[in-house]
Amino acid sequence: MRAADFDCTIKRTIFSQSGLQAKPQYKMPDYEYVGKELRKSGVTLNLLWLEYCEQCRNNGELPYQLTQFKKYYRDHAAKSNATMHLCHKPGEILQVDWAGDTANVVNTDTGELMPAYVFVASLPYSGYAYVEAFFSMNEECWIAAHINAFKFFGGVTHIIQCDNLKTGVTSHRKSEVVLNKTYNDMAEHYGTAILPCRVIAPKDKAMVEGTVGVISGFILAALRNRRFLSLAELNNAIGERLHLFNHKPFQKRDGSRGSEFEEKRKFLLPLPQRPFELSEWKIATVAPNYHISVDRMNYSVPYEYIKQKVDVRITRSTVEGFFNGNRICSHPRLYGRQNQYSTVEAHMPPNHQKYVQWNGDRFRHWAAKVGENTHTVIDALLEGYKVEQQGYKACIGILKLADKYSAERLESACRKALTYTPRLSFKNIQTILSSGQDKAADEKCETEKNAGSQYGFTRGADYYEGRMK
């Protein structure tokens, strides 16, 4: 018999002979599991204790009572939740979050109070903070808050640390973090990186969590009895309290958050020349006329992408098209009446580019080289259409007649056409030239001129004008 078995036999014999019972063996709960379950919505220690008791009964084990269950969990939490001091470098991290408390703005139409959500950004090294109120916590306000914070600080940190809110993080998996596209574009524009906190780990950004608490007391609580009729009025009051907060002297050391920040401002990255513009992404198909339609406006794309689907980035001032991640077009955004076109000549096929190079001024300049009457005909032709481009084909036809009949005959034909018809057309000019009417008109003019010089009784307008005096 082994020594261990022999000891157990002796213990059982002694306890049985003395009438004593062995100390009951309680089942120790799995507190790692308990801690994970408590993070889920609606789960409490009481519920987990009941589940633990039922599991013990099913396995024939002895459960702890609720008091002991909670005591052992507190002991476990005290050991597993040990904190570590984080050493921050100046200009390295900007921690951002929405404050839990809200401010109020009075609706001047209805008199009701509208909640204003407070954005807080803090630099952990100095504790210097930026605070602004918004009527919403949507993506537009989230991005605008960051842009205003960067402007306030006069620079950008190397890292932005935020919670896993949907306006910032699409998904936070074990293997990768998928950022909101617009949020990521903003970070790239400013040359910074976004580093979300671990899921349900507020101690990763303890500085901003602490600042939020202080802000709630120093700013929001101080303004609780004031009535604000607009968001701008509220933010002006927040700005005044924020200045006091940032420049309030430290209690245990010299200086303030403001002086500490000014000393280390040089470690921030410089701001870009232009602030980031909030963008919206859509997918559009390139039409056969090599244009994409965005908000009922049309923007050209290189004709090689006809029938392809492209990603469209829309900002307040710009519309950009992307294919496989490469930008293929960029246009100023159109506003006003619907169905306007923004077309870049380089996006057209070669045969379309030749046509678009023609315009009314070019036709008029060409006609003026032929003669005054030709210029008058071309100008009248272009003015006769509701859309000038409708007359281009006729203008080309008329001016090309000079190659067949000579510029002098074309000028004569235009002069004759102007004498008998107000509705000028290519057919009129062509008929005059093909029938030789332009030559007959020239001969008649020449005869009248010679007759006037042969006979002295031919009087001009000046003569009759003189007799009338």
Image: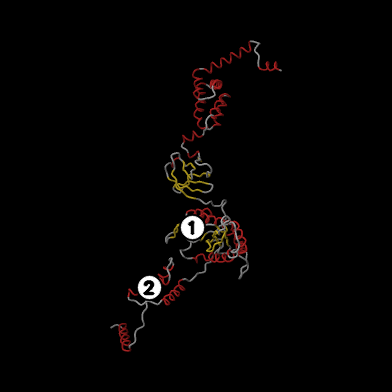
Name the kind of residue labelled 1 in the image.
Answer: Gly
Q: Residue at x 61, y 12 (%)?
A: 451
Asked if 209 appears above or below 280 in the picture, the reply is below
- Seen from the viewer's position, the closer of residues 181 and 235 is 235
* Quarter occupied by residue 245: bottom right
**x and y, in percent, of residue 134 in the image:** 55, 57
Give the camera-side residue of 246 and 239: 239
Which image quadrant for residue 253?
bottom right
Please name the residue shown 42% across and 42% down the image: 307
In the rendered image, which residue does mark 1 sit on?
Answer: 168
Q: Is residue 4 left or right of residue 412?
A: left
Q: Is residue 436 left or right of residue 448?
A: left
Q: Residue furthest right?
A: 469
The count of marks equals 2
Dot 2: element: helix
Residue 13 is tagged as none
